[in-house]
Image: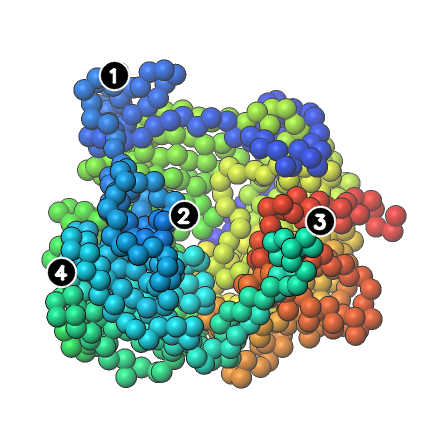
Amino acid sequence: MTPPIRSSSLLFAVLATAAFAAAQGTEKLTFGDTRKPLQWQGRIPSAAWAADGKHVEIAEMKTVVWFDPATGESRKKPANAAPVAAPLRKTAVVREGDVWLVETSAERPRRRPRNGDAPTADGVRVTSDGAGPGKKEEAHVGGDGSVVSFVRGNDLFVVDVATKDVWQVTADGGPELFHGLLDWVYQEELYGRGDFQGHWWSGNGKALAFLSLDESPVREFTVVDHVPEGFLERERGVQAEVTNYPKAGDPNPFARLTVAHRDGKKLVPVDLSSFPKDVLVVRVGWTPDDTRLLVTLQDRIQTWAELVAVDPATGAVTKWIREESPTWVNRPEPPTWLADGTFLWLSERTGYQHVYHFEQGGKLVRTVTAGEWQVRTIVRVDEARKLVWFEGTRDGATGRHLYRIGFDGQGLVCLTPGVGTHEFTLSADGAFVLDQWSAMDQPPVVQVLDGGTGAVVKEIGRSTAGDAAAKYAFAAKQRLTIAGRDGYPLDACVMLPPDWKEGQKYPVFLPTYSGPDAPTVRDEWRHSTYSQFLAQQGFVILQVNVRSASGRGQVHTGTCYKQLGVQELKDLEDAVDHVVAKFGGDPARVAISGWSYGGFMAAYALTHSTKFALGLAGAGVHDWQLYDSIYTERYMQTPEMNPAGYRASSVVKAAKDLRGHLVLLHGSMDDNVHLQNTMQLLWELQRAGKQAVELMVYPRSRHGLHPEVSEHGQEFQWLRLQRLLAPAGK
């Protein structure tokens, strides 16, 4: 069952635009203005929980006021009030070629320490040999800060901070074997872009689990820098950059896991013999008492995931939880541990992610949440009162809402009712919520809510539409629900030209991403100057969450399984038809634009549909056989297993069917979506005699454009869009 369609109409659209008419300006933006930091949102009232966790600290002009939501009283902040101090954490950083132990602010701990972390003091220099023996990287602190680990030359080292004794844990690391360090595909597709950490300390700092990746079976890919530093004056050659990059169907790195014990310098291999040789090790952590190493494993095409417990003394593995899916299993989040040794676990086993209560060993205690909606994250747990706060989608997937429920699955309440996106923080006892709320048609509002009912206790203040909206003609965003050809309700939004008139025809601009579970329509107050500029020029701007990018749950996301692009394009076409019928869109002047997955969708639309006059395709995957194995096979299986799906999803193989005008953009050094994608598409377009094609290659640019040419990229696209402003045929 799908969520009910919310009512929407042209009357609502006109009224929503008219709501800002009194406050908005009349001036028109220039393209140059799109590169300026114009403000489409006014100042947001400043409020935060005080250090006592009970009062809301509000900045009013030069005065700081304390508001007590329990009594409703406001008073000047006490002179002796404790400041809200960010906690400190011990962090290992690499500085001057050596590893240093420093204290840094931990208000929002990052996934990994970075050299840019500002130390509160000079810190302790842990190593003293500099970068001479090789570059040190991925330095991490163990336990209470008495030990530090790092990787050098793809080998793992441990240093005792007090004695400076160094233990070289591994000695055979090299270009084909990574110890304690992730390779490109593992960090990009499993642990998070930029996170190369491949070793994890136990809480007491006595044991260190580390991943070893055998790269020998992985094929290499070469990226060429045609404009190296000192080109012409000092360098007239090119520089090649060679990386291990497994494409769909190619061999993956082989992973093995080891526990290093500081006492006795003992290494214990984890026994993964009951799993496939190419099993993916997708998450590693420890139980709170350090008695077990918890590891999440997945098969190559990610149709299952298993949470297993490892005895660190023997390496023996015990299987706890197995997740399976008729499509794919997303990497599970780590357990949320409770004091009694049980834990909360997020699972998509019903097709919607929900909270489950488990005992150690994998015995299910109870299902905490259920329904045709999903829990996105667990926000807080109160074990004494047996309550869980979480962010979920029961009241819509385009917003952000806070809910509370009992451990027994009873008493579910939405604490942020209504439409929109809520940024929330709970008081220390959970009795109140400090909420910053906005929606497409509402600039941010800061308020205090009752933590039991969600009722507004106090509105602290409201933002305005911003100085730019007061100066320039403003195009409001209007939320829509569009029925697909099969009746499926698609979340969408539209921006009309400020001088829009019924009965006239307007070009349509559809920027999209449309990748799996990656929605672009969000019910919040967020405006870009470029979008406002295009609306002023006369474009109707449409955005839509295709069903696989709706954020509603795996049941919906899985509709793209084994056929990327096919269902997404149908949903985009239906959204275009709606705008043509209801908002004066000109069916002969529709443009689609995107980057990365969105670049694939733009090129796919131009080769598989008749509804688009112009496609702006940046850094697209134009045949999924050319993208990395872990991402692609999650959604498509391997080319050998799913040849029909790969053919149906290919832009390259459909080049002869190009309709409309296709503009291709790509960075020449893109190490994520290789330029090879665009080159192979170009070859097939040329062989098919297609002339309605343009190409812009950006030297020195990778998957995103180099900052020095980003303006060029936007203007290049605008000049192509500009052609659609004239009626078709002129």
Instruction: Kindly identify the residue that appears in the image at 18 percent across and 78 percent down.
Output: 316
Return the disc, 3 or 1, that comes first in the chain's sequence.
1
Q: Nearer the viewer, mark 4 or mark 2?
A: 4
Percent across and percent down for residue 101 are 25, 48
How crowded pointer 2 is (Cα within 10 Å; few <14, some 14-19, many 20+) is rated as some
Label 3: state its secondary structure. Answer: helix
Return the disc, 4 or 2, that comes first in the chain's sequence.
4
Percent across and percent down for residue 145 are 19, 51
Percent across and percent down for residue 696 are 72, 56
Three-letter amino acid code at the position of disc 4: Asp
Three-letter amino acid code at the position of disc 3: Gln
The residue wearing badge 4 is 289
Answer whether residue 157 is visible to the viewer in this image.
yes
Q: Which mark is residue 717?
A: 3
Asked whether the residues under the numbered discs 3 and 1 touch, taking CB atoms below 8 Å apart as contact, a structural biologist would say no
Label 1: state its secondary structure. Answer: strand
Q: Which mark is residue 75?
A: 1
Instruction: Kindly identify the residue that appears in the image at 52 percent across and 74 percent down.
Output: 220
Compute the Cα span from label 3 to label 1.
Answer: 54 Å
The residue wearing badge 2 is 395
- Quick one: quadrant of the N terminus? bottom left
